[in-house]
Amino acid sequence: QVQLVESGGGLVQAGGSLRLSCAASVPTFSRYAMGWFRQAPGKEREFVATISWSGGSTSYRDSVKGRFTISRDNAKNTMYLQMNSLKPEDTAVYYCASKRGFGFPYVQEYEYDYWGQGTQVTVSS
């Protein structure tokens, strides 16, 4: 069983930055690919970014490319999402997810095994 805990969400003005963290309670963290998803009010959950088990490969949805950066520290069992130049349309609950495996990329919800509870990100205009 993998437990994932997100943190770092909050309220920020448009153009601002936030850094989300996802702490995993599994000693074999480096055997998992990781991803970030988000769900805005009234919308379905959507893929944001994913990172391979080693951190050597990353993939993003088009709307966040150049603004968001996904990274991980396997020694700390933690994944991050640095979000810059935030826009009101980035407002959502952000979820981290884990997928045991060495493939890449994993961009579909059904591919992931474990999910965190989510952290709210609100961007005001």
Image (cartoon, grey):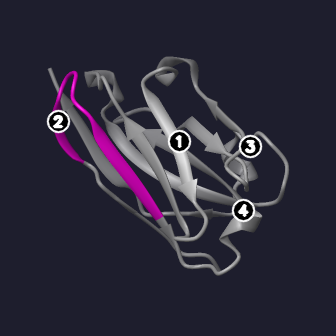
Which numbered disc, 2 or 1, marks the residue closer to the eye?
1
Q: CA distance from mark 3 to mark 1?
A: 14 Å
Task: Check disc 2 and report the residue beneath it.
Answer: 12
Position of 112 compared to 2: left or right? Answer: right
Label 2: few (<14), some (14–19) or many (≥20) C-alpha neighbours in 10 Å: some
Label 3: few (<14), some (14–19) or many (≥20) C-alpha neighbours in 10 Å: many
Q: CA distance from mark 4 to mark 2?
A: 31 Å
Q: Main secondary structure of the magenta part?
A: strand
Specify the amino acid type for callout 3. Tyr
Q: CA distance from mark 1 to mark 4?
A: 15 Å
Label 4: few (<14), some (14–19) or many (≥20) C-alpha neighbours in 10 Å: many
Count of residue discs: 4
Q: Earlier in the sequence, mark 2 or mark 1?
A: 2
Q: Residue 8 at what x, y percent from top left?
A: 29, 54
- Per the rendering, the mark at residue 70 is 1
Q: Earlier in the sequence, mark 4 or mark 2?
A: 2
Which of these two is toward me, 45 or 61? Answer: 61
